[in-house]
Amino acid sequence: MFITLEGPDGSGKTTQARLLEEWLCQEGHDVVLTREPGGTEIGRQIRGVLHDTRNAKMNARAEILLYSADRAQHVSGLIEPALANDQIVVSDRYYDSTLAYQGYGRRLDLGMLRTITTFATGGLTPDLTFYLDISAEEGLRRRKDGGGEWNRLDAEDLAFHRRVRAGYRALIEREPARWAVIDAARSMEEIAVAIRKVVASRLGQGRSAAREAEKRSS
């Protein structure tokens, strides 16, 4: 099973990805926790270039190609091998971030971005994507107060971050069955519980389908 977490900066994705991994491991699952960009050694080098605030003049086309290079390495070098090994993959961001940030935020052509993304991923789509929803203003406030990495995209103006949030909502409307929307204004514990309930339900459905398949083949 391939699970991704998406949302505006400051929505708590990284924390919730870690908590989900811990819970799944406690439930006896073999889990790989990763992130984009930077889920591989090559990806970590690309992340450094992408997030460096000194690179404020980076061209938007160069930006999408760097994210896609990271993603191609991520899928081929980590995600696909883990899924082939029957592991659950939990990723802090995946290609929906590109569509939201570069498509809606940067206003690059969505059709072009989807073509590039399909090439980079080989068409690999998450089984389940969580969207942690929070206002652009609150998300940026959390980022600043948290004292963590303040990267090149965080430094964009408020209008950019509002377009990103609107972009996520458009993506959810386009493909609602894959998404689970979580109110990220709630406490960390409440969010974690809500995520676990959805994952437990999806895993239960998968086990039921497997049992039915076994019955039909016997």
Image (cartoon, rainbow, N blue to C red):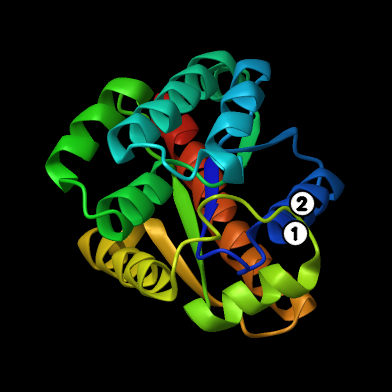
* Image mark count: 2
Give the percent coordinates (x, y) of residue 149: 72, 53
Say which element carries label 2.
helix
Q: Give the answer, above or below, for where 182 lies relative to 118.
A: below
Q: Is residue 86 visible?
A: no
Tell me the residue at 71%/71% (across/down). Answer: 144
Look at mark 2 in the image and give the residue it sits on: 18
Q: Which mark is residue 15?
A: 1
Q: Quadrant of residue 65?
A: top left
Q: Quadrant of residue 183?
A: bottom right
Q: Is residue 72 visible?
A: yes
Tell me the residue at 48%/45% (across/down). Answer: 56
Q: Amino acid at mark 2?
A: Arg
Q: Give the answer, above or below, for where 150 lies relative to 131.
A: above
In contact (CB < 8 Å): disc 2 and disc 1: yes
Cα gap from disc 2 to disc 1, whole angstroms: 5 Å
Q: Foreground residue, 130 or 96?
A: 96
Say which element carries label 1.
helix
Q: Which mark is residue 170?
A: none
